[in-house]
Amino acid sequence: MTRRFLHRAVIFTLYGLPLQAHSAENAAARPEAETIEVKASALHDKADFGGGGLMRPVYAAQATSIVSKPFIDAQAPIFSAYQLVNNLPGANVAASDPFGLSPYTNVTVRGLNSDALGFTLEGTPLNDIAYYGAYPAQFADAENYRTIAVTQGAAAISDPVLNAAGGLMALTYLQPAKTPGGTVNVSYGAYANSRQFLRLESGEIGQSGVRGFVSYSHTTAHNWRGPGEDRRQHVDLKFVKSIRKHSDISLIGSWNRAVSSYYPQVTLDAWHADGIGGSNNLKAWYDAGHVAQAQNYYRLWEAPEQTFYGGLPSHFALSNHLSLQVTPYAQAAYGSVASGATLPTSGIYNGVTPVNGHLRNLNGEGGDAVVRANGVQESYRTGFNAHLSLETGRNKLTFGYWYDYSDDREVQSFTPVAPDGRAPNLWARQKSGLVSLPDGQPLYGSAFHTIGQVNALYVSDRLSLFRDKMVLEAGFKDVIYAIRGQIIFPVRNIARVGAIRCRSLACR
């Protein structure tokens, strides 16, 4: 049997021998050789088949580990990117839920948190522009990943990241199929976990050279401890246009809309006392008669989030030795990290100025009123990364420039709570539904607005020796990061505002 992987074919040669000699002529006859040729299309590149996709060979001047499609297909489809790399060297994942839906998830690489790691999707940055962390539930669905690479150390000079002291996680999409088709995945499990996934492949559209896929998924799951539910909708897309040999333009996008619940952090003593239940969880019912209990009603802690990532990774072969890589990108995000809180009905300050008169929309007279504190973040980001590479024999010289513009607004507003525990306006977009000053303007506990710009120039050189058995690489990157903004100081005399939480375990 001969296996020819280069041609993606398996050729079998069978020799047939007679089971019984019916005559002397048959006994004396030589067995005839019969050849059967079987051809099959490979599902993945040969490089993906290292250790079942978990030990893909890497030839680079840096420590990098990669999980690829065969391994990803063998895992639960609900897994996030963090959970898929949990077995890689140096990587450790801590998650508050087993389904990868909670934003309170952290990955460490060699002891450094996610806010010290860079994250990219097809060369576009994914880090939060304010806190530098990343939230894997917002990334692509597992079925759409081709590879997830973790660099345990310094990121490449050309990567568009600022904070990658601990390494880089690089995500890549599948290449769209050349023929039309689709994939359907439906699952149901414990804790009312339900997930539906659909991906449609266009194949090559006419003679245009364009092919692509679009996928949609819907996921829900109950909390594994305490009340609450996570809900997520997600869309991924990728379209590729082949221009000529070694030149193509890709359009990628990822949209995510989710409402996540909250798991209170538990001390060891509290766990020994109550275990999975009791005071270690939020309250399933609203108790208007007890303010301290009412503000722990689980619906007041639901956190909505909507994000979009888009990019146009493009590669152009300008000659046999010269190539250009250009990746424009854009991002938008809006979310609220909500929590139960109490607000005094009088004696409030707006910044450092006392408020005269009654607050609007605040229920109750005298004492403290239960409200939902909305930690709203609205951000936009755009930029591009471009580099020119000259490859001559064993040497590759690269010159590049990265520009990034970001706009981040963060305010803490307050939503009144009805006697039955209802607190509408979950997304805190409608100002008319917020606790307001006597003049009708929303009352803010804090407000921040920052604008940042990054200008980076870099150059690198790679030398390959002894038939790629030794690779030497050196480079230099000069980054100018300018940030300006406005800050309104927090309101004074707030009785108790629930913990203003960051969106990962890597809190400020």
Image: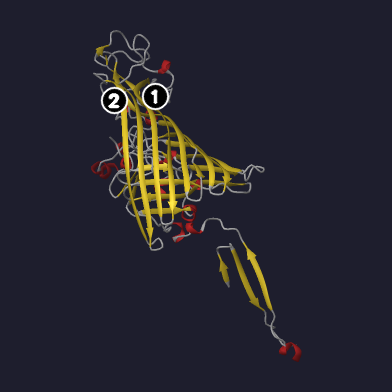
Query: Which callout, 1 or 2, points to the residue nearer the camera?
Result: 2
In the image, residue 17 above or below residue 1: below
Q: Give how far apart the Cα atoms at labels 1 and 2 are.
A: 17 Å
Image position of 107 (left or right of 347): right
SS category of the residue bearing label 2: loop
Which image quarter is the C terminus in?
top left
Q: Residue 421: which numbered mark, if any?
A: 1
Q: Nearer the viewer, residue 117 or 191?
A: 117
Q: Name which residue type carries label 2.
A: Val
- Please state the horizontal and vertical placement of residue 193, each as a whole percent of the image: 47, 43
SS category of the residue bearing label 1: loop
Image position of 431 (left or right of 199): left
Q: Is residue 38 visible?
A: yes
Q: Residue at x 39, y 24 (%)?
A: 421
In the image, residue 126 above or below residue 406: below
Q: Which residue is mark 2?
A: 497
- Which residue occupies the extreme bottom position in the image? 24
Q: Residue at x 33, y 40 (%)?
A: 277
Q: Residues within 10 Å of mark 1 (few under 14, many from 20)?
A: many
- Please state the horizontal and vertical placement of residue 410, each as a whole percent of the image: 35, 25
- Please state the horizontal and vertical placement of residue 73, each as a whole percent of the image: 50, 53
Q: Name which residue type carries label 1.
A: Gly
Q: Nearer the viewer, residue 345 or 318?
A: 318
- Please state the horizontal and vertical placement of residue 173, each as a whole percent of the image: 49, 46
Q: Residues within 10 Å of mark 2 (few under 14, many from 20)?
A: some
Q: Is residue 306 visible?
A: no
Q: Residue 475: which numbered mark, if any?
A: none
Which image quarter is the N terminus in?
bottom right
Q: Nearer the viewer, residue 95 or 472?
A: 472
- Sequence-first tag of 1 and 2: 1
In the image, residue 123 above or below residue 482: below
* C-beta proximity under 8 Å, tags 1 and 2: no
